[in-house]
Amino acid sequence: MTAWPPPAPDCWLLPSVKVRPSAIAGVGLVATTDLPAGAPVSRLGGRLVTTSELRRLLAGATAYVDTITVASGVHLVLPPDRPAGKGNHSCDPGLWWAGPYTLATRRPIAAGEELTNDYATSTGEPAFTMPCRCGTSSCRGIVTGADWARPDLQQRYGDHWVPALLDRIRSGPSDRSGPSGPSGPSGPSGPSGPSGQEA
Ligand SMILES: [Zn+2]
């Protein structure tokens, strides 16, 4: 089991990164200065909850609940409406994980560029799916909570996943007869998407 430090109570965002209208969706995070590769940009904070607490939260939510998986059965829930939570997904992102809560630049970033991350690197909930129109040449069209198992993504992102997914990746190729295989629902309550929205 991976040890992880407790999160800060709130989020931190590099002051030169601003929330601006996005070409991908709504608003996003935009660099207002050039950034070198490896620069920490965002450190998420909030509180840790269990999977069952998270499902209760999502079921009762009236607004978007911003959350990432930190470790197996442990999720970070951000305080509502934080700028650090506005990062959009891209299938060819400029940010990736450099610790349990920290996103850093994956390559040099030019001023004016939108800062994105690949939600697959922080989402292991099998029920999560999201259509993607990021417009990059490597766009997968749909992002899912099972994308972490894709060899092409494991190759591309190396160690830059949240710890829970890195643990799964390091424990080897997924064994479909294993205890948490990706086949149909087996729990007492069906999984619901992270947005908590009804179809
Ligand atoms: Zn895409």
Image (cartoon, rainbow, N blue to C red):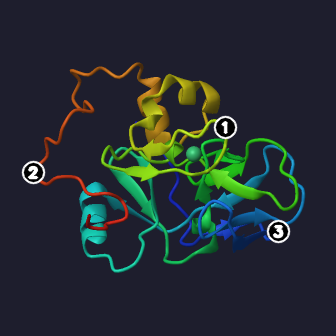
* Residue shown at 60% from the left, 59% from the top: 88
Badge 1: few (under 14), some or many (20 or more) residues near its Cα, within 10 Å? Answer: few
Question: Which amino acid, mark 3?
Answer: Ser
Looking at the picture, how far across and down is residue 131, in whole percent? 46, 51
Q: Which residue is mark 1?
A: 137
Whether residue 71 is visible here, answered yes or no, is yes
Residue 77 to residue 100: above or below = below
Residue extending farthest to the left is 188
Q: Which residue is mark 3?
A: 16
Question: Which amino acid, mark 1?
Answer: Ser
How far apart, in angstroms, are the residues tagged by discs 1 and 3? 28 Å
In this view, the residue in front, 21 or 56, is 21
Q: Which residue is mark 2?
A: 188
Looking at the picture, how far across and down is residue 146, in whole percent? 39, 37
Secondary structure type for disc 3: loop
Looking at the picture, how far across and down is residue 83, in whole percent? 63, 73
Determine if the C-beta at disc 1 is less than 8 A from ligand 1. Answer: no
* The quadrant where residue 139 appears: top right
Residue 153 to residue 113: above or below = above
